[in-house]
Amino acid sequence: MAIIETVDPGEATGDVAEIYAKDERDLGYVADYTRVMAVNPEAYRAWEQLVRAIVAQLAVRRFELVTLAAAEGTHSQHCRLAHGRKTLAVMDADEVEAVARDFHDAGLSEAEVAMMEYAKRVSEDSAAMTEADSLRLRELGFTDREIVDITLAAAARNYFSRAIQALAVSVEVPPGISDSLRGALLAPL
């Protein structure tokens, strides 16, 4: 499962049990990445709070699109699969599959494509980014707040993706992901 020991769901107590219960409700099981990250439940809760604060500003669709692009940039199978499933709440399966295969040719708005390009760049080479990277977003009407929130969403995905990759968490295919969608989500990696 991973390079560290985790608490079995039947033995979890306190915050860890609450964190596990959320996965049980949402997925029908406790994901391996949840078990690993819940080893530090305070950090896991803080990360969840950060994500909620970002989603409250970006809205779910934008957050999930940014997340898919950032997960592609970090080559995170875990996050591409998990957020491919979550994106099904705001797009139908065919749309999610098209976005996963090539967001440039998926019928997204020009602003959504630019936002995803930016998020992918944050994940691939943030140290080399300059004001020029945000210029396209500004040209398309994104405010400073929106650019910060897009950046935070991509950076939050980097944090989580890189942590679970470093801890050798096994990749799981969540329920509701067809073979076709799974293939599309993983193809760019």
Image (spheres, rainbow, N blue to C red):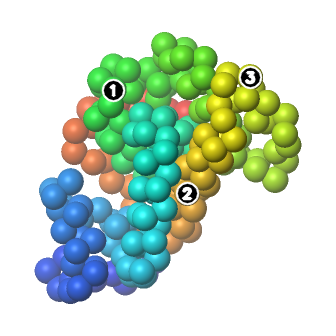
**Rounded to the nearest whole Å, what is the CA distance between mark 3 and mark 2?**
25 Å
Q: Amino acid at mark 2?
A: Ala
Label 1, label 3: how far apart the Cα atoms are: 26 Å
Decide: is 52 above or below 46: above
Residue neighbourhood size for the residue with mark 3, other residues' Cα within 10 Å, grouped as few (<14), some (14–19), many (≥20): few
Residue 149 higher or lower than 170, as above or below: above
Provide residue 32's location: percent of width, then percent of height: 33, 66
Give the image location of residue 115, x and y in percent: 61, 32
Depth order, front residue of 42/142:
142
Q: Is residue 90 left or right of residue 113?
A: left
Q: Which residue is mark 3?
A: 139
Sequence-wise first label, 1 or 3: 1
Residue 91's image quarter?
top left
On the rendered image, what quadrant is the N terminus found in? bottom left
Residue under label 2, please give it. 156
In the rendered image, is residue 93 in sight? yes
Q: Quadrant of residue 162?
A: bottom right
Judged from the image, the secondary structure of the residue bearing numbered disc 3 is helix
What is the C-alpha distance between the residues marked 2 and 1?
A: 22 Å
Identified at 76% across, 50% down, the residue is 126
Residue sitting at x 33%, y 19% = 94
Q: Is residue 20 left or right of residue 102?
A: left
Q: Quick check: marks 2 and 1 in contact, CB under 8 Å? A: no
Which of marks 1 and 2 precedes in the sequence? Answer: 1
Which of 163 and 167 lies nearest the eye of the viewer? 163
User: Which residue does the image show at 59% across and 47% down from the upper left?
Assistant: 149
- In the rendered structure, are the residues bearing label 3 and label 2 in contact, judged by CB atoms less than 8 Å apart? no
Residue 91's tag is 1
Label 1 amino acid? Met
Q: In front here: 19 or 105?
A: 19
Q: Nearer the viewer, residue 44 or 162?
A: 44
Q: Quadrant of the C terminus?
A: top right
